Amino acid sequence: MVAGTPKIELRGVKKRFGSKVVLDGIDLTIDAGSSLVVIGGSGTGKSVMIKCVLGILTPDEGRIFVDGIDVTRARGRARDAQLKKFGMLFQGAALFDSLPVWENVAFGLIQGRGLPRRKAKDIAIEKLAKVGLTADVGALWPSELSGGMQKRVGLARAIAADPDIIFFDEPTTGLDPIMADIINDLIVSTVKDLGVTTLSITHDMASARKISNRIAMLYQGKIIWDGPTAEIDKNGNAYVDQFIHGRAEGPIKMQVRS
Amino acid sequence: MNIFAAIGRMVLLTFAEAGRLTLFTLSAVLNIVQVPIYWRLIGQQMMRIGYFSLPVVGLTAFFTGGALALQIYMGSDRFGAESFVPNIVVLGITRELGPVIAGLMVAGRVAAAIAAEIGTMRVTEQIDALTTLSTNPMKYLVVPRLVAAVVTLPLLVLIADAIGVFGGYVVSTQSLGFNGAVYIKNTVDFVTHDDVQSGVIKVAVFGFIIALMGCYNGFHSRGGAQGVGAATTNAVVSSSILILAANYFLTSVLFEK
C-alpha cells in the first residue's frame, strides 16, 4: 500500500434496482485506522453501499478501491484476497443456526482459511472471551442466545480472522439502550485493540457518536454531509440537522416505498 | 391498461427468469468440478435427501405396486390376459411409476425443505455472511445438495422398484390368487437391465431438478416470511412440473426405436 492511500475509496458509485436509483454517485474516502459512520434513514441505500464494497453487489457505475486496488469487478483469487481483509457484523447478527456458537465464530478460519478445527476452536474461544463471553457459550446454539448475545457472537466472528477492515451494519438495532451501549463500548474497545479501519451504518445517533471519529450522511443516493464527529452539531445542513435531532418537521420526507 | 404492454412485460419477465435460472445452473455445475469439495456436507445431505425420504417413497411405492396389480388384473380380465400382471407391474414400476413417484414425493419433501432453509438463510443475510467469511455460497450450499440428490435418488428408486414389485406381489398372491413362486419367476424372467436402467437415469435427472429448483428458489427469495413461503411453493410446483415434462422427453429418448 502506498503511503497516504485511503484504506477504502468510493468514486462515483451508482446502483439502481429496476427504476429505483439507490446510490446516485457516492464519493467517499476512509483513511486507514479511522472509524466512519454513515447515517441515513431506512431504505436510503446504506446497506447497499456496504454490500458494493464487499462485492456482494456489483455497482452499475463507479469504482471502489481497497488499499488502492480496484475491487469493483474483482473475481476469483483477487476477490478472495480482498474478502480476507474484511470482517462484518450483520444487522441481525446472521449467525448460522445449523452450527454451534464456536463453529460460527471459527467458520471463516475453517472454511475460508483451511485451519484445523481444533486450532480454529481455540481461536474462537479466545475471540469469544474478547467480547465478554465464556467458553461454555461456545457450545450453545445461536437460537439459545438473546439478541445482545447474538450481536456479541457476531462481533467475535467478525474479528476471528484478524481483519484489516470491519463493517458494522446497524450494530445496535433491536437492542435495549443498556445492551446497545455495551455493544458500542465493545466495538470501541475492539477497534482500539485491533487498530482496524471501520465503516459502520446506523440511524442510531447515540451509537454513531460513540463509535466514530467521522460521520457522513447519505440521502437520496448521495453523501450530503461528511465531517468529523465532533462537528456534527455544527453541520449547517438542514437535512443533517433534522436527522440527528430526529425531528418529524423538516426537509426530509419519509418514504413510503423501500 | 395497455394489454400489449402487459403481455410484453410478462414475456420480458419470463425471459429474465429463464436467463437467471440458466446462469444459476451453469454456475452450480461449474462449481461441482472445482475445489474445495465439502464431502462432509455432501454426506449430510445424502442422509437428509436420500435416507430420510426412504419411508415416504417406500410406502407410496408399495401401495402403487398393489394398486397397479389390481388395475391390470381387472383390466386384462376383459380379454383373458390376467397372467400378465407380474410382467406389467414390473415394467410399469421400473420404467415409469418408480422414478416418477419417487421424484414427486422427494420433490414435495426435499425441494420444499431446501427452498425454506436456503430462503431463510437469504432473508436473514446468512448467505451474505458466508461470502464475507471467504466461502462461496454456491459451493457450500448448492453443490452438496445437487450432488447428494443426483447420487441418492437412483439408489432410492432401486429400493422403490423392489418395494413396488413387492406391493404387486402381495396383492396378487393374497387377493388375486397368484402363486407366489410363479409370480416371482415371471417378474424376474421378464424384467430387463434396460428397464431398470432407464428408471435410474430418469430419477438421476429428477434429483438434479429437485435440488436445483429448491436451491434456485431459496437463493432468490425476498421479503421475509412471505417470500420464503412463496419460494417453497414455487420450488415444489416448478420441480414437479419439470419432473413430469422431463419424464416425457426422457421416455421418448430412452425408448426410441
Image (tube, grey):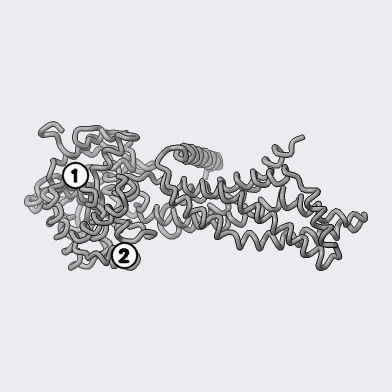
- Residue under label 1, please give it: A164
Residue at the spot 26% in from the left edge and 67% down from the top edge: A136
Residue A23 horizontal/vertical position (percent) = 28, 42
Q: Residue at 70% of width from left, 42% of height from top?
A: B251
Q: Secondary structure at mark 2?
A: helix
What is the chain identity of the residue bearing mark 1? A
Give the image location of residue A221, x and y in percent: 26, 43
Q: Quadrant of the N terminus of chain A?
A: top left
Q: Quadrant of residue B161?
A: bottom right
Query: Both on one chain, marks 1 and 2?
Result: yes
Identity of the residue drawn at 73% across and 60% down:
B166
* Residue A152 percent coordinates (x, y): 23, 61
Q: Is residue A7 above or below residue A87?
A: above
* Displayed quadrant of residue A180: bottom left
Distance (Cα) linking label 1 and label 2: 28 Å
The one nearer the camera, A254 or B233, is B233
- Mark linked to residue A139: 2
Q: Amino acid at mark 2?
A: Ala
Amino acid at dot 1: Asp
Q: Quadrant of residue A156?
A: bottom left
Q: Is residue A182 left or right of residue B200?
A: left
Q: How many discs mark residues in the rendered view?
A: 2
Disc 1 element: loop
